[in-house]
Amino acid sequence: MAIEIIGTGRAVPPRKVSNSDLSARLDTSDEWIRSHTGIGNRHIADDGTATSDLALEAAKNALAMAAGFTGDAQNTADRDLAAAEAAKSIDMIILGTATADFIGTPSTACIVQHKLGAEKAGAMDITAGCTGFIYGLETAAGLLSLGRGRKRALVIGAEVLTRVLDWNDRGSCVLFGDGAGAVVAELTGAPAEGPQRRGLVRTILAADGSGGESLLFRRGGTRYPFKKGETIENGVCVEMNGQEVYNFAVKAVTDTAAALMQAESLTADDLAIIIPHQANARIVQAARRRLKIAEEKFYLNIEEYANTSAASIPIALDEMNRSGKLNRGDIIMTIGFGGGLTYGGNIIIW
Ligand code: COA
């Protein structure tokens, strides 16, 4: 039995903010941001939009595809009908995010479960920073493989990071954007081993908690709780040591790609595409030089979306899928890294 992806979806807010837009109010420039990160734009959610709203849209698009809906995926009544039907077949919803609607509870996954009408689904969030989708997919695969009657899982990565940024800190605020991506994973009759094998065939999940403070939401948890009546000046926005994260990320991408290829006896030539977490194009370039893998093997859309954390890999997967760039049998490698610190990757045979 294989764990196959039978539907993909994404949702990004319509409001697009370019580097030049930012430089009008911040001491930065299009030239600096592009040359240091590869980022040109980011999409920013309007005030009333929370993470679950983007997650819900991405999920509907993935569910509708899983149900065979082939029309325009944006907000059509037919899409919603197809998605609502497919939602009833979902056994588990797993949502990776660093920017949940609420701290602690309810989980963002539960909010999505309710709005989808996924009445038989369990639902939970995964906190693994930008590696959340990779952790989520493997967790879903584990649950589906247990033989306890679960057949389908919805795995989502969703973020509204721009709401937790310090917009005066040019070293961090230019890097991030909002969005969501989702997949429907199904336990199918296809073989999981041998030459005809399909689906999620290998995953690496790793962590280095010693670096946790280099990417941190300091306030609001039990370590540094908000106190009633307190005026909060600092610590509510994401704090980042860019250099430390950069060095960690280059090694994480390099080590994960090498380990996945070794474990599956693959060379770069065997891979149809590598989808790295879209944090900084320079991180990908540095890693690929170490790995000696050609630039064309890596899918990059960071120019358009910036870093959407847990959403970046499923957004990229959906873009490729919907534009017909994925063929049956293609070997796809995903690589994620981020807060925790966490890292890892998947090998998926499409
Ligand atoms: N615009 C203009 N100048 C900027 C700037 C901006 N947006 N951000 C920083 N600078 C300046 C700094 O103030 C510094 O100026 P100084 O030399 O006068 O002090 C200079 O640029 C160099 O800063 P530095 O931090 O050394 O730049 P860098 O080349 O290391 O790039 C990052 C900074 C953040 C782009 C890079 O470290 C990075 O991408 N790190 C990983 C971050 C990440 O991916 N996080 C999420 C992981 S999931």
Image: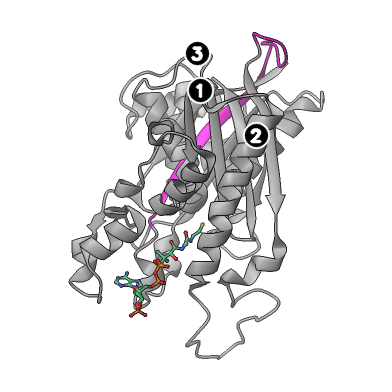
Three-letter amino acid code at the position of disc 3 = Arg
Three-letter amino acid code at the position of disc 2 = Leu
- Residue 105 position, x and y percent, is 65, 60
- Residue 333 position, x and y percent, is 55, 32
Q: Mark 3, residues whose alpha carbon is within 10 Å: few (<14), some, or many (≥20)?
A: few
Q: Say which mark, if any, is on residue 328.
A: 3
How far apart are labels 1 and 3 at the CA level? 17 Å
SS label for mark 1: helix
User: Could you say which is closer to the camera, residue 317 or residue 254?
Assistant: 254
User: Could you say which is closer to the camera, residue 222 or residue 288?
Assistant: 288
Q: Quadrant of residue 345?
A: top right
Asked if residue 84 is positioned above or below residue 208 in the image, the reply reads: above
Colour setting: one colour
Q: Is mark 2 within 8 Å of ligand 1?
A: no
How far apart are labels 2 and 3 at the CA level? 20 Å
How far apart are labels 2 and 1 at the CA level? 14 Å
Horizontal side, residue 223 vs residue 312: left or right: right
In the picture of the structure, the residue carrying the numbered disc 2 is 260
Q: Mark 1, residues whose alpha carbon is within 10 Å: few (<14), some, or many (≥20)?
A: few
User: Could you say which is closer to the camera, residue 220 or residue 18?
Assistant: 18
The magenta span reads 177-196
Label 2 vs label 1, nearer the camera: 1
Three-letter amino acid code at the position of disc 1 = Asp
In the picture of the structure, the residue carrying the numbered disc 1 is 269
Residue 281 in view (yes/no): yes
